[in-house]
Structure formats: C-alpha cells, structure tokens
Image (tube, rainbow, N blue to C red):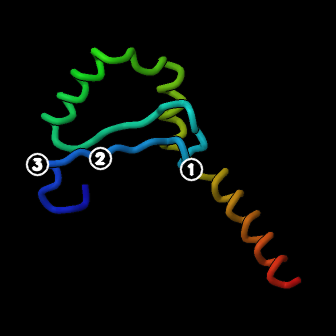
Amino acid sequence: MQVEGAMDIAMEFHSLSKTANMTGWRVGMATGNPDMVNALMRVKSNIDSGLSQANQEMGIAAWISPRNGSQRIMRCIENVATRLSRS
C-alpha cells in the first residue's frame, strides 16, 4: 500500500504461485482497508473452506524464508546467458 491514502480505499492481493514456485497451491493473502478485508473474509467463509493448516504453514515458511532457491536459479540463468553470449 505505497500510495498515500490507499489504506482508506483499497486492498492488495499477493500470491505465492510464482514468488515461491507454489503454483496450484492457491496460497495468497490480502491486505489493506480493514473493513474491506473483513468483508472479504465474510464472503470467503461462505464460499469455500480455505486452506489446510499444513498449506498455511508452508505458505508462511515460503513467505518468510530467504529466497536462496530463487537466487540459485538466477545465477544459473546468468551463467547460461554469459556462455551463450560468448559463443
């Protein structure tokens, strides 16, 4: 919520699908205006059952852990790009 006043009128949604390679897990979060977040929670509680405790804990671990895996992948990609540019 980087824009001034955003907390008054908006919500942000975040997913771990691409960030933590958790595609298909349906792990995400919402933040923003408390009234809007509460309304979303009321609607969601009537539509679906939510994530299992295990999935929630894995999502939390993925969110707070260092991105070592991502950094390793980026180094590999940079290595390949460097080698290709030399050939």
Q: Earlier in the sequence, mark 2 or mark 1?
A: 2
Q: What element carries label 1?
A: loop
Q: How crowded is mark 3: few (under 14 residues within 10 Å), some or many (20 or more)?
A: few
Q: Which residue is at the far right?
A: 87
Kind of residue at disc 3: Asp
Image-based side of 62 in relation to 8, left or right: right
Mark 2–mark 3 contact, CB under 8 Å? Answer: no
The image quarter containing residue 4 is: bottom left
Q: Give the camera-side residue of 72 and 78.
A: 78
On screen, 3 above or below 32? below
Task: Find residue 1 and report its image quarter.
Answer: bottom left
The front one of 39 and 66 is 39
Rendered location of residue 16, percent (x, y): 50, 42
Residue type, numbered disc 1: Pro
Crowding at label 2, few (<14), some or many (≥20) Cα neighbours within 10 Å?
few
Q: Position of residue 78 (x, y in %)?
A: 73, 71
Residue on which the image places disc 2: 12
Provide the residue designation for mark 1.
66
- Secondary structure type for disc 3: helix
Who comes first in sequence, dot 3 or dot 1? 3
Question: Which residue is identified by label 3?
Answer: 8
Residue pictured at 11% horizontal, 48% vertical:
8
Residue 71 placement, left or right of 43: right
Mark 2 to mark 3: distance in Å? 12 Å
